Image (cartoon, grey):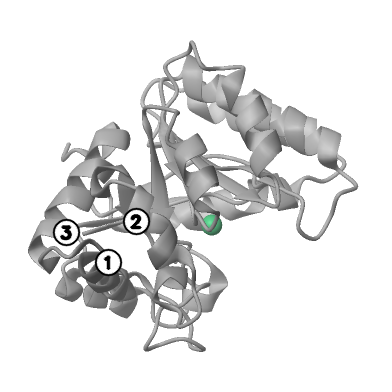
Amino acid sequence: MIDTHSHIYEPEFNADRNEVIIRAKQAGVECILLPNINAGSIEQMLDLYYQYPNYCFPMLGLHPEDIEEDYRQVLADMEKLLEAPDHPYIAVGEVGLDYYWDKTKVKEQEETFRIQIEWAIKYNLPLSIHARNAHRQLVTILSDYRDEPISGVFHCFGGTKEEALELLQFPNFMLGIGGVVTYKNSKLPETLSVVPLERIVLETDAPYLTPVPYRGKRNESAYVVEVLRKIASIFNVSEQEADCITTNNAKHIFQRIKPH
Ligand SMILES: [Zn+2]
């Protein structure tokens, strides 16, 4: 298993981060991918990477909900980090569009997203994409880059069958599935009936979106096994097979996580 989206560098884990890593390893998690949020989160994310350089892998990006007045400067500073030939970043993330809480920065969100898609192309990195209440705009923007070699994950996918099929028309993208799929009233199991297992990667989004039976508690990477179990039952395959396929899918997208 690979937890393809986890924020365990955040302060919620300051008291027991090493135990969180130990529990993830014991649960069979092969490695943990760390999406960045903003300029201020880079240092704590890299601290975790330096501590576990073959287990925790950092991404670099500005989250759509973290766009402030100085976003152009933040983006310029971040791009300098990607220019270093031996940088540790395995993806551009997390990036995208979020019109759920705040629609006042639509233009800035779209500009920021496009700039970061262009990094992914220029620096040959996959994207970890966050999109909420923005499916149409997401498809429109990504379509402008159809002829470019873009790849990545639609993290925390929670849309309809039609939306899933539309996103899967981008050939080198996977749907990131997390704890929501385990929730009692989730429509996601039914939606996934149109999605091949070869297009799914597992994630936690820790500390958020904790799967059943831990719902209500802080999420952590070890709980990705609950997502695996649910995926195996939805696709009617063994946990071992679901693990093998989704892990290969993650390695196919995040090519820089190969042991080095
Ligand atoms: Zn996230």
Say which label, 2 or 3, has the lower sequence index: 2
Evaluate whether residue 49 shows in this view. Answer: no
Task: Tell me if 9 is positioned left or right of 196 in this view.
Answer: right
Task: Name the residue beneath numbered marker 1.
Answer: 234
Question: Residue 6 sits in which quadrant?
Answer: bottom left
Circle 3 or circle 1, nearest the eye: 1
Percent across and percent down for residue 192 are 38, 56
Q: Amino acid at mark 1?
A: Ile
> Do the CB atoms of the residues marked 2 and 3 lie less than 8 Å apart?
no
Q: Is mark 3 within 8 Å of ligand 1?
A: no
Evaluate whether residue 61 shows in this view. Answer: yes
* Disc 3 secondary structure class: helix
Q: Amino acid at mark 3?
A: Asp
Query: For the view shown, which residue lies furthest in the top direction?
Result: 147
Q: Amino acid at mark 2?
A: Ser
Task: Name the residue beneath numbered marker 2.
Answer: 193
- Distance CA(mark 3)–CA(mark 1): 13 Å
Task: Tell me if 257 is positioned left or right of 158 in this view.
Answer: left
> Do the CB atoms of the residues marked 2 and 1 lie less than 8 Å apart?
yes
Task: Name the residue beneath numbered marker 3.
Answer: 243
* Disc 1 secondary structure class: helix
Percent across and percent down for residue 167 are 49, 37
Where 35 falls versus 167 (above or below)?
below
